[in-house]
Amino acid sequence: MQALLVQGDSDAPKAIHQGSLGDRVYEALLSQIISLKIAPGSRISIDALVREFGVSQTPIRAALIRLEGVGLVVKTHNIGYSAAPMPSRQRFEEMFDLRLMLEPYLAARAAERLSNGLREELARIAAAMAEPPGDDVKLAYGKFALQDARFHSWIANHAANELAAEALSRLHAHTHLFRLRFHSHLTEGAIKEHAEIVAALSSGDPERARDAMASHILQSRARMEPHFVSLESAA
């Protein structure tokens, strides 16, 4: 199988061998965007990626489409692809405000509606996020960001309110947040809080689920608050 070469922290080429070629290209780009090797707002040259990765344009274009779907890449007509710009501090604050209005409500509704099978499925999603990262820390961090988004969207999609779930999905708040600070303490806190949300949902108690989700969002906001300063200084 062809090996995809990416640049690690030491700038020495590093091959990713696992998975399909399309998945490997996607994961390589994901790790570069999440870790800010590809800077927010910067152009993404498909030809340059062809040379860097040693693959054709097809898997690169497919990966960019997938990344566009999770809000990390934007496509502009007659210009091409670029990394999504980093939201302003005000935008992040608005994201948290909207999440606090929507997600505790959605968690409470989901707690009343989940079958035992669905509760087990949610527990598996949360457990996967707590698995030890592999050797590629940047890739593991990027995957965690997407798993985090999946965890929250799963709850929203099982709350029987499509409009509220759609509003939440359009924020792409989780993937943007993880670009703010590349650090393991963000994942450690989220894992513990997710476990509390799962327990609350499994209990079938809507009030407990609402409180667990609200607490998680508030704690996430507190963890990210120091990093909003960099956004203000860059403005």
Image (cartoon, rainbow, N blue to C red):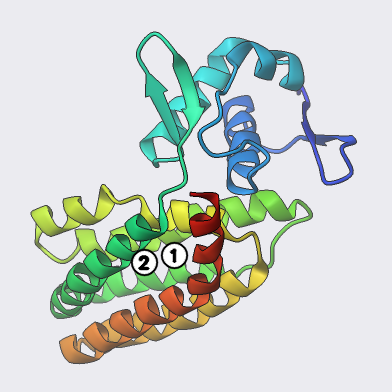
Which of the numbered marks, if any, corresponds to residue 39?
A: none
Q: Is residue 58 above or below residue 17?
A: above
Which x, y percent locates residue 72?
46, 40
Look at 13% across and 59% down and name the residue there: 164
Look at 65% across and 48% down and name the residue there: 35
Give the number of callouts.
2
Q: Which residue is mark 2?
A: 121
Q: Is residue 52 left or right of residue 156?
A: right
Query: Dot 1, crowdedness within 10 Å: few (<14), some or many (≥20)?
Result: some
Q: Is residue 3 above or below residue 93?
A: above
Nearest to viewer (mark 2 / mark 1): 1
Residue type (three-letter) at the residue carrying disc 2:
Glu
Q: Quadrant of the N terminus?
A: top right
Tag 2–tag 1 contact (CB < 8 Å): yes
Which x, y percent locates residue 123?
41, 73
- Name the one closer to the observer, 111 or 51: 51
Q: Is residue 66 above or below residue 91?
A: above
Which of the numbered marks, if any, corresponds to residue 125?
A: 1
- Name the one closer to the observer, 196 or 128: 196
- Name the one closer to the observer, 172 or 84: 84
Residue type (three-letter) at the residue carrying disc 1:
Ile
